[in-house]
Image (tube, rainbow, N blue to C red):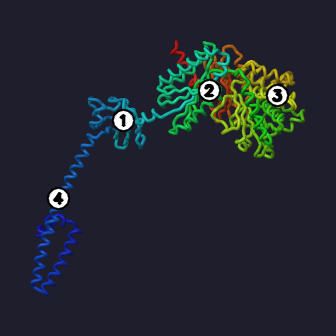
Amino acid sequence: MKKLFSQNLLPVFLQNNRLRLVSASLIILASVGIILAFFINFILGLFLFVLFVALVGTTFYAIDTVTKKTNRYISDLSYRIKRGEQEALIQMPIGILLYNEDAEIEWTNPYLQQYLGKQEVLGKKIATIDPELATLISENESFDEPRNVRWGDNQFEIIIQKSIHVVYLLDITRYAKIEDRYNDEQLAIGQIFLDNYDEITQTMTDKDISNLNNYVTNELSNWARKYGMFLKRVDDDHFFVILYAKALQAIEADNFKILDRIRERTSKQNYPLTLSLGIAYNDTDLAKLATLSQSNLDLALGRGGDQVVVKSEDDPARFYGGKTNPMEKRTRVRARMISQALQEVMGQADQVFVMGHFKPDMDSLGACLGIRRIAAMNGKKCYVVVNQDNLHSDVQRLLDEIKRYPEIEPFIVTPEQTTDLVSEHSLLIMVDHSKPSLTTSPALYEKLHDRTLIIDHHRRGEEFPENPMLVYIEPYASSTCELITEMFEYQPKDTEAISKIEATAMLAGITVDTKSFSLRTGTRTFDAASYLRSVGADAVMVQRILKENVNNYIQKNHLIETIKYIKPNVALCAGEENKTYDPVVAAQAADTLLSLSGINASYVITKRPDGKEIGISARSLGEVNVQVIMEKMGGGGHLSNAATQLTGVSIDEAKQQLIDVVNEVEKPAEDAAEKSK
């Protein structure tokens, strides 16, 4: 009896407790209604009873049929899902590999097997089957997120579940190729400028100019054709280039040898022509790319030309070339134009402030005094801003001499004093530097950053004032004093001439920066010195001001005693870890090393007086570009005269950093020389 009423004998849908309860409730209600109908009318009750039985039977049959079909469908669907899972595991285009604790393969699906070849893999170590795959797994098993890797000729997205030792490999080679093609076909825009075209062609015949133009155009056209670039000549000395990012990568890998090729070939014809290039990339806005390429070209020219600047809006600049010293211009046209522009700008200001770099040298202070005199000739007050803390002995002697000149001494002010003097119509002139971070008074620069002029002879770096009113950067010049001396010829003649102390200070600046006229001198350098002598510069006073301190002389010799060769013809000296040295002493030691036989480049590492920084002075005779080396370490300067400061490192660490950078920079040149043999 108990078996008879077992739930298993009930229809499938009534085996559910809730449905059974609902069904029982409906039957009871219907039964009560039928019984009441019998009391009212027997025929009505009988009719309702028959109708109830028919409805219950029909409903039970329909629901039971639907339930059975549903269960059959679900069973079939479950089977298909399980079968699909099994088929997918085996057939889907994702490689799956199971391995054990000993890195032995326990199972792979057929899709992965095709990448492993026909070899038997089960039970064998992954490293035995495919060392490259074993390396990929070991390198990426600590990452939870998918990573893109290259295995053989294909690229994969790899996911490793280290806890259960499963590797999933999704072949993304097709999509990676699409991405690579997109990246390779990004546009870059370049501008090429023939640095000294006007100067060279001035003395050439029409026939020679035509031959030179044909040669340059052919060389650049062949170069453009080789890398699939579009090249258009837009002026006698200006070319426009459009290229793909892939071509740019190839040209960078070649280190822009086109510069060396044209320079060397034209030099053999006694017309040494050099190129400068500015290239911009990584932007879909072509107008922005064109503007940035011009800015990059300006940067290359500001650094002396004969080089390439490659830069995007977000990435730091990359420099190529710059292996030769900039050639001296043959005309004074630009000096006259700058001088006239300077007069116009001064005329719009109520007063002028001039300052050099933070720790002034003779060139910096001499240039400041020269600008002060030019301002006076144009009827403007000019204040020379000097930080008088920790001045070098020669600069201190010059300032002491200036105290004897009451018409000049009141205009020598400290950065703190400028706070009460500056106004919104004041003009700021930065001399002997172009980096705001190196200026004497950053606060004054911030106040007058939109009313700033720059006069400098150092190669321009990435850090540069934004939108200066006037820029006069001539890396070919020996010193800033030389540039400013040339401007006196174009000043009003009916004003008070340059004084003896100002002329002497400027001559001292030229003397220091040229190492007594032995380095980086041209005809205009001697012309400037001759002019200064003619207006009263005292050579004896120059020698007296530049006299070397006995202690500094001893320190310099002590540094030279530490000389070591880090490469053939490259010398390195380093000071003691617990001893500070005046930066000028380090620079003098580096200069002295160049006077020794067999040394073409020198580096001197010392701890600076502030005790927080390590200074490196770099010098060369021109064969080694020390500017590039110092720039990679955060500094800058000239091809043959550069420096940098490092923070948070010891002398030994700075030495190792320098050696690493020297090797990095000089290795491509050494490799090229080796190939040419």
Q: Which residue, given by chain and number where applicable, does mark 2 sit on?
A: 628
Q: Which circle, 2 or 1, is nearer the viewer?
A: 1
* C-alpha distance separating marks 2 and 3: 31 Å
Identify the mark at residue 174; answer none if there is no mark. Answer: 1
- Return the residue nearer the eye: 327 or 650: 327
Q: Which circle, 2 or 3, is nearer the viewer?
A: 3
Mark 2 vs 1, N-terminal side: 1
Q: Secondary structure at mark 3?
A: helix
Q: State whether residue 435 appears in this view.
A: yes
Residue 146: x and y, percent? 40, 41
Amino acid under label 3? Ala
In the image, residue 447 sits, relative to residue 44, either above or below, namely: above
* C-alpha distance separating marks 1 and 4: 45 Å
Mark 3 vs 1, N-terminal side: 1
Amino acid under label 4? Lys
The answer to whether the residues at label 3 and label 1 have Cβ atoms under 8 Å apart is no
Local crowd size for mark 2, using a 10 Å CA cut-off: few (<14), some (14–19), many (≥20): many
Local crowd size for mark 3, using a 10 Å CA cut-off: few (<14), some (14–19), many (≥20): many
The answer to whether the residues at label 2 and label 1 have Cβ atoms under 8 Å apart is no
Q: Which residue, given by chain and number where applicable, does mark 4 sit on?
A: 69
Mark 1 vs 4, N-terminal side: 4
Q: Secondary structure at mark 2?
A: helix
Residue 11: x and y, percent? 15, 65
Q: Secondary structure at mark 4?
A: helix
Q: Which residue, given by chain and number where applicable, does mark 3 sit on?
A: 505
Residue 517: x and y, percent? 76, 19
Mark 4 vs 3, N-terminal side: 4
Residue 170, quarter of picture = top left
